[in-house]
Image (tube, rainbow, N blue to C red):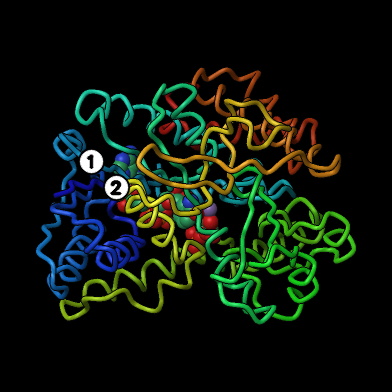
Amino acid sequence: GIKLVTIGGGSSYTPELMEGFIKRYEELPIREIWLVDIEAGKEKLDIVGQMAQRMWDASPYDVKVHLTLDRQEALQDANFVTTQFRVGLLDARIKDERIPLSYGMVGQETNGAGGILKAFRTIPVILDIVEDMKQLCPDAWLVNFTNPSGMVTDAVIRYGKWDKVIGLCNVPVNAMMAEPELIGKKPEELIYSFAGLNHFHWHRVHDVSGHDVTRDIIDKMYDGDSGIPANIHDMPFFQEQLQQMNMIPCGYHRYYYRAEEMLAHMLEEYRDPAVGTRAEQVKQTEAELFELYKDPNLDHKPEQLSKRGGAHYSDAACETIASIYANKNTHIVVSTKNNGAVPDLAPDDVVEVSAYIGATGAKPIAFGALAPAEKGWLQVMKNMELCVEEAAVTGDYGLALQAFIINPLIPSGETAKRVLDELLITHKAYLPQF
Ligand code: NAD
Ligand code: G6P
Ligand code: MN
């Protein structure tokens, strides 16, 4: 039997994970699940942990869900470790969003200044987890969902020297679920090729006779659901731009391709106390979800969870684990070491790409070189990530400033430095490296 550990177990997404494992139990026979959290998340852990146990009790399978604040106890002899924690919880995210917006800059969970600060808080913690894994479960796979998922995964390999890691995101899953219907196809009738970075990838689509149908999807995506996650304002891309590149950008590309309009929309919500930033809206949804989870009769994932941007993430997480365990070689879009799949980036850069997932982990599928417009963005973004990661590890203030100045969503100048300083002070308790 398999021992599975989930760090950040108090997340409202935990029922999503349980549903995915219950669905796959026959191919992935889990024996025990350990949900790990910290003191600040204990109440959430208790509520969602009991809900998780009820979900298993309502299934035909005998699985015990352990709840603990002792990470090391949980990691002992684990086979798979999934991470879904948020350092500083939603209150830290509210600051990541509101402080940049108060200076007229994008305030977002994984993009711009907020995304950089989330990396600064998170990377030291993931590196501690990896050190524990080296001692307690050296053969385990780490399946990371914690944002910024690409940078966190890259840091695990580059600085943690831990290769058995796969980074995940639900954005590609959502696109592959929604797009086929736009052109009257079923998911199994289309072949997907993704390449880029987490929250910054593009994809092409072919049908099973080998025809490129990317353009057909581009032409239909303006009239229907293209799978954009619930947390992103649906500002349409310029159609001529997409036709020119003949690729479909990810939902987050809007922050870069329609920067002016996306910022205006965010500022509008931020200035309206009845709306607020995304984290403030999510806090409300989370409170509602935990009220539902408290119900001792609830033993299945509630519909309301689909209001969260990460809906369907278990399709990626549980399928990745099942594919490693049973050597299925399934196509999954993951953050993994490039190894030449995206020749415009270095072989040891973590990229988000189509890959086959099996017993040895991810085998990225060669995508090929990008055209100058996309290559330019990609190289800026990856090198920005590398500055962020190194600053997160060393606490080098000058490098943190470099990351801010390179980031396309942070206009350079006096204000950028002020935003960095204010965020570093605000999050001081979670930034021992600075
Ligand atoms: P959340 O605020 O509910 O946090 C989850 C739990 O992490 C909390 O219970 C918290 O107490 C716990 N935690 C904080 N620090 C911890 C630590 N050091 N060790 C163990 N647990 C700790 O967050 P959420 O909204 O459920 O999101 C969880 C994470 O998953 C976030 O990082 C979020 O950005 C990420 N996420 C990723 C995707 C994706 O596509 N990759 C989608 C959705 C969410
Ligand atoms: C997305 C992303 C996640 C992100 C989340 C935000 O779709 O893929 O990486 O964390 O949704 O959702 P939320 O509901 O927390 O705003
Ligand atoms: Mn994501």
Label 2–label 1 contact, CB within 8 A: yes
Instruction: Judge depth for marks 2 and 1 and give the one in front.
Output: 2
Identify the residue under disc 2.
Answer: 325
Residue at image coords 75%, 60%: 262
What secondary structure is found at the residue carrying circle 1?
A: loop
**Residue 279 seen:** no
Could you tell me residue 286's position as x and y percent? 39, 66
Give the answer, above or below, for where 285 lies relative to 404.
Answer: below
Q: Quadrant of residue 141?
A: top left
Regarding residue 101, the answer to whether it shows in the image is: yes
Q: Nearer the viewer, residue 299 or 280?
A: 299
Q: Amino acid at mark 2?
A: Tyr
How many discs appear? Answer: 2
Of pointers 2 and 1, the one earlier in the residue sequence: 1
- Left or right: 313 with respect to 100? left
In screen coordinates, is 218 left or right of 120?
right
Residue 389 percent across, percent down from the top left? 55, 27
Instruction: Please name the residue that numbered disc 1 is placed on.
Output: 79
Q: Rounded to the nearest whole Å, what is the CA distance between mark 2 and mark 1?
A: 9 Å
The three-letter amino acid code for the residue at tag 1 is Asn
